[in-house]
Amino acid sequence: MHPTYTQSPISITSKSKVNKSPTILSSTTPSYLPSARPITIRPTDTRKPTTFKSPSISSTQIPSKRFPTNQPTSKSTSSPSPTAAPIVDVTYHPYAPVMLGTVKLYNLFMGDFNSPISNTTRYLMNYLAANIGGSDKYSVVTAFFQIDPITKIKTYMSNSVQFKGSMNIPTFKTILTDTDIVMTLIAQFNARTIALDSNAVYAFIIRGDISIHTNGGSFLSDWCGYHSAFYLTNGMIIKYMVIGDPSTALYNGPTCEYLIYNTANGNVGADSMANTYTHELIETTTDFYNAWYFDQDGDESEDKCIWNFGTLIGNANQKIGNKQFLIQKSFQPGVGCVLRVQGLKK
């Protein structure tokens, strides 16, 4: 008999966004698991801590980490000037896990993606998912590792992603919360319309005319995307990320778009989401359980290079598969912001 999956409250260690020290979440009260920061829009954004309340379902939720809408105010083809402040390196927190081996990736589209433009958006996002593994962009994860608490053996991550496919999930709601998204994913597991996999990332790609609200703010007003995770009753941790399409937003779309026309693939929605998507994917795989983050400000690795594209060639800066994309640099521990992993010695 196919099991019915629910979320279950358990005791975990979570990072405090206020003082950066670990706190123990209650084992009896449903709680979010460690939170990820959104991608913000405003360059002056202070990235204040976000406190997440427990969902009204029997669950333990890993609090979402969001991609702030830290959007440069100038719509030029050059990247924002780098800050003069010294780089704060990323720190591994023993013995937190990362996603090792080949990561499975699923794209879950919510909203109406049936118009000709939206069909192209869907194609490009699936193309990105199918080709991100082995790319220069994703190569940075090979600088991240986890340490076994018993053997003390250090195991590095792999530049390996397997795209398992996509599906459309109908929704009649015009406003979604994070709980709605979690329950939608659980419903797909129970209906066996999508495989249950602890080494997978489930990417929700949501049309911009659907409002997405969390306790940490709203899409376009406060963030462009986020990632989170939750436990099932069998102890499995399910990782997911949420990306909104700014090109179909009813207002404020440019806050999550670096270029608003003449984008790399001629599709503002997909070309803008590609940046957010890869940002959240890398943070999900390296930091779904607070394995890697910055001690001084709580930022994750991709946050450290947010909206930093380096030198552009036309309207793109890197190739994934056979297509050009404009995607921010990634932070490599001990090195800084890079377009691909640099001189890694293991």
Image (spheres, rainbow, N blue to C red):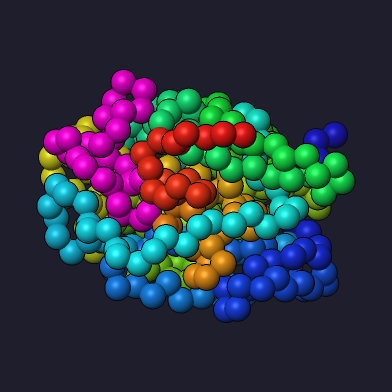
Q: Residue furthest top?
A: 322
Rendered location of residue 150, percent (x, y): 87, 46
- Provide the residue span drawn in magenta: 305-329
Residue 225 in which image quadrant: bottom left
Residue visible at 49% across and 28% down?
A: 133
Image quarter where the N terminus lies is top right
Q: Is residue 300 left or right of residue 233?
A: left
Q: Is residue 342 visible?
A: yes
Up the image or down, 273 lies above or below 36; here it is above
Above or below, 315 against 253 in this view is above
Q: Does residue 317 show up magenta in the picture? A: yes
What residue do we see at 36% from left, 39% from top? 339
Q: Position of residue 278 (x, y in %)?
A: 42, 42
- Quarter assignment of residue 69: bottom left
Number of marks in the rendered image? 0
- Residue 86 counted in the magenta span: no
Q: Residue at x 70, y 37 (%)?
A: 155
Is residue 346 shown left or right of residue 252? right
Q: Say which residue appears at 52% left-offset and 70% top-offset.
A: 296
